[in-house]
Image (spheres, grey):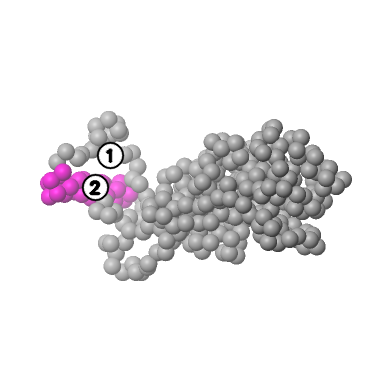
Amino acid sequence: HGNDYYLNVVEMAPEQRETALEAAKQRTLQFLYFIQNDLGFSQLGLADDEFPTADRLPFLPYHREGRRIQGLARLSLNHILDPYAAGEPLYRAGIAVGDYPVDHHHKERPDAPKLEFPPIPSFNIPAGSLIPKTVDGLLIADKAISVTNIANGSTRLQPVILQVGQAAGALAALAMKKGKLPKDVPIRELQDAVLAYGGYLVPSYDISPEDPHFQALQRIAATGILKGRGEPHAWANRTWFYPDSTITLGNLREALIAFAPGLEETPADTNALASLENIAPLLVALALELRSENAPLESTDHLLGYLEERWASAPYQLSQFDATRPLSRIEIAVLLDVLLDPFHAKAVDASGKWQ
């Protein structure tokens, strides 16, 4: 942390800022001198082909943290630790992801609270963190998004803020195109744009954007019907969706009831593994609940015949049609996404609440 420098230039006059930033530059150069001379790494230095500045330093300092807005959503450590049990379902409104641990540098400030940061899984950033609560026509990115001080220790990383910047640009473009304020653009439309340019709505370590079913899983995960399992892991945390694993009919039914409470009367053998044959009644019931126009509703037999004809072709692109075999989680995600489209059937606000 030898290059850290505490500085608050927000309320300084321009001349004061220049003086303060010059002192920060000198700290960096002193740290480099220490590395070269005291530690003996004389081969390390400032690149002469990176920045066209007289001192070879960047145009702007790197700010680890600054002032942050109060947004339509505010991401906290609790949301990162367990997105499904944090109270607010911010994960449903995700527009970017991150995997860095909580990391704060306070070695030079002995008066700073001594906090032990817990290990965390990978996480996502809700759209509401980019939209100010009380200022219209403005979008925020980088370190100024609506997160807590502790959460900023993870969300500040470049891979995260680059995604946030892309999402802010997409939201601004959608707002202009529709003639709306950013806060009035449907969140699902913003998320569609994020997926269209290869972005993530939720973190998924075990399925990447190159997979043909990536977007289907992302959309179903953003409804909460299929949930990931977070895993703290060194300096690159993970969330697993186990796309090739099975799920019991009882667990799937419970997840679908949480999404569409009208399914509570649907009977199910809770211990059986979910198969096309035993989830067909659930699919028909859910189609009725969502008023889906994509699914044939005459009977479960008709539905199975409909799926058999389309199983291997786009947009399903699945293999080995067999109504009796257990389905994988990715197959269930694709079935729900293509057949019923629950992602678009229930709108969410900028904090992930159902609208």
Kindly identify the residue that appears in the image at 69 percent across and 58 percent down: 272
74 or 204, which lies in front? 204
Q: Is residue 103 above or below residue 182?
A: below
User: What x and y, as percent, mark residue 340?
Assistant: 74, 45
Whether residue 115 is visible, yes or no, is yes
> Quick check: 294 left or right of 202?
right
User: What x and y, as percent, mark residue 354?
Assistant: 69, 56
Q: For mark 2, what is the residue?
A: 28
Residue 31 covered by magenta stretch: yes
Residue 70 covered by magenta stretch: no
User: What x and y, as percent, mark residue 304?
Assistant: 78, 43
What's the CA distance linking mark 2 and mark 1?
9 Å
Secondary structure beneath dot 1 equals loop
Kindly identify the residue that appears in the image at 36 percent across and 55 percent down: 8
Kindly identify the residue that appears in the image at 51 percent across and 64 percent down: 78
Q: Which mark is residue 281?
A: none
Q: Residue furthest right?
A: 298
| Quadrant in which the N terminus is drawn | bottom left
Q: For mark 1, what is the residue?
A: 57
Q: Are marks 2 and 1 in contact (CB under 8 Å)?
A: yes
- The part of the chain drawn in magenta is 14-41
191 or 284, which lies in front? 284
Tag 1 or tag 2, which sits nearer the N-term? 2
Look at label 1 and name its amino acid.
Answer: Leu
